[in-house]
């Protein structure tokens, strides 16, 4: 296996709306799409479609959404040996997308809360064979912490996407990851610093590196991404590299961050240096915003190569 994704699964219930109903109002919405999602699953699917061999460590419930999720992993060639089944509902995410492709998302975590530290420990050997562990914050935090500790113990680098932003997340664990990949709002919550300008993002990301984070990669939506790390020469010298987003006309940006992370992880385990992996991830995520839906918008390696050519 190349990548172990230890994270969430959801079934996305995506309603395309003209506007949000007000209290007590019933509105007709133009269209609806059911899709497999969850940050963990999205990142796993993006990496798998690009050709990585992905091990998924997650927990589904005992409903129809569980079957959909497992079938989706199989269809994408993702290893399901460590997909746990718990009693109760699976994770679901009602998502509302307006005509300007702005989205509002509710998350019902369901069985995602049943993925325990012991479940991660139970697949220690398989995880140790992987070249990268990828985690997010849509599952129990104690499970995320065990995943990061396990990575350290077995010498597998950990990529943490600290999403969704969680005030309960203990920053000490971010320092222990090789790659920390927040968007602007997650960066704000991690640092307590405003990140609504380039100056703010830079100051906050630098602070993270100064506090021990190795590689901080901030995704900035239509403004691209920004990588911060410590310079090789001694002392505390932070260096950064900015990458502009591709100029495209976005249709639906849901899941762009997950596309970016899955593609970045895929290239890193296949030997790219960080700048090359970022370039690739930036293009892959740009392609994903051209189609509606989350995983529906993730291209295979062939489709992506044709689009880039
Ligand atoms: P998240 O969904 O986690 O908030 P972002 O919105 O930061 O993630 O988007 C992740 C990446 O997707 C960006 O870094 C960029 O590469 C790409 N992206 C997002 N929106 C656009 C856009 N409008 N045009 C081009 N690329 C985009």
Image: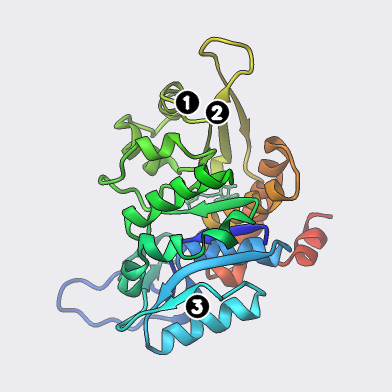
* Cα distance between the residues tagged 2 and 1: 7 Å
> Badge 3 local density, few (<14 within 10 Å), some, or many (20+)?
many
Residue for badge 1: 209
Tell me which numbered mark, 2 or 3, is placed earlier along the sequence: 3
Does the closest atom of ligand 1 sit within 8 Å of the Cβ of label 2?
A: no
SS state under label 1: helix
Asked if the residue under mark 3 is in contact with the one under mark 1, i.e. CB atoms within 8 Å, the reply is no
In the depicted structure, whether residue 228 falls above or below residue 146: above
Furthest toward the bottom, the residue is 64
Q: Residue at x 48, y 80 (%)?
A: 33
Marks 2 and 1 in Cβ contact (< 8 Å): yes
For the residues labelled 2 and 3, say whether their Cβ atoms are less than 8 Å apart: no
The image shows residue 187 at horizontal and vertical percentages of: 39, 38
Tell me: 82 left or right of 46.
left
Label annotation for residue 35: 3
Q: Nearer the viewer, mark 1 or mark 3?
A: 1
Q: Nearer the viewer, residue 231 or 276?
A: 231
Q: Tell whether 87 sits left or right of 234.
A: left
Q: Which mark is residue 43?
A: none
x and y percent of residue 1 in the render? 67, 62
Do we see residue 186 in this rendering? yes
Q: Disc 2 marks which residue?
A: 228
Q: Is residue 128 left or right of residue 110?
A: right
Q: Nearer the viewer, residue 263 or 303?
A: 263
């Amino acid at each position: 296996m190349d990548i172990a994704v230890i994270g969430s699964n959801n079934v996305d219930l995506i309603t395309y709306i003209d506007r949000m109903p007000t209290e007590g109002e019933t509105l007709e919405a133009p269209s609806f799409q059911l899709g497999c999602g969850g940050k963990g699953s999205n990142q796993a699917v993006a990496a798998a479609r690009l050709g990585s061999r992905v091990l998924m460590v997650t927990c589904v419930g005992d409903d129809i959404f569980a079957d959909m999720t497992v079938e989706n992993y199989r269809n994408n060639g993702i290893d399901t040996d460590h997909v746990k089944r718990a009693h109760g509902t699976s994770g679901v995410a009602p998502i509302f997308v307006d005509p300007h492709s702005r989205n509002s998302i509710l998350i019902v975590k369901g069985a995602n809360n049943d993925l325990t530290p012991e479940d991660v420990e139970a697949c220690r050997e398989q995880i140790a064979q992987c070249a990268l562990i990828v985690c997010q914050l849509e599952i129990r935090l104690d499970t995320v912490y065990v995943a990061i500790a396990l990575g350290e113990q077995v010498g597998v680098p950990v990529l943490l996407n600290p999403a969704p932003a969680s005030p309960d997340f203990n920053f000490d664990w971010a320092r222990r990851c090789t790659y920390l990949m927040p968007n602007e709002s997650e960066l704000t919550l991690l640092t307590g610093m405003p990140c609504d300008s380039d100056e703010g993002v830079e100051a906050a990301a630098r602070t993270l590196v100064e506090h021990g984070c190795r590689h901080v990669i901030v995704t900035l939506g239509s403004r691209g991404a920004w990588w911060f790390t410590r310079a090789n020469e001694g002392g505390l010298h932070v260096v950064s590299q900015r990458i502009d987003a591709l100029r495209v006309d976005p249709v639906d940006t849901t899941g762009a961050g997950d596309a970016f992370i899955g593609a970045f992880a895929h290239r890193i385990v296949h030997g790219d240096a960080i700048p090359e992996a970022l370039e690739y991830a930036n293009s892959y995520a740009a392609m994903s915003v051209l189609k509606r839906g989350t995983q529906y918008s993730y291209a295979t390696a062939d489709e992506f190569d044709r689009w880039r050519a």
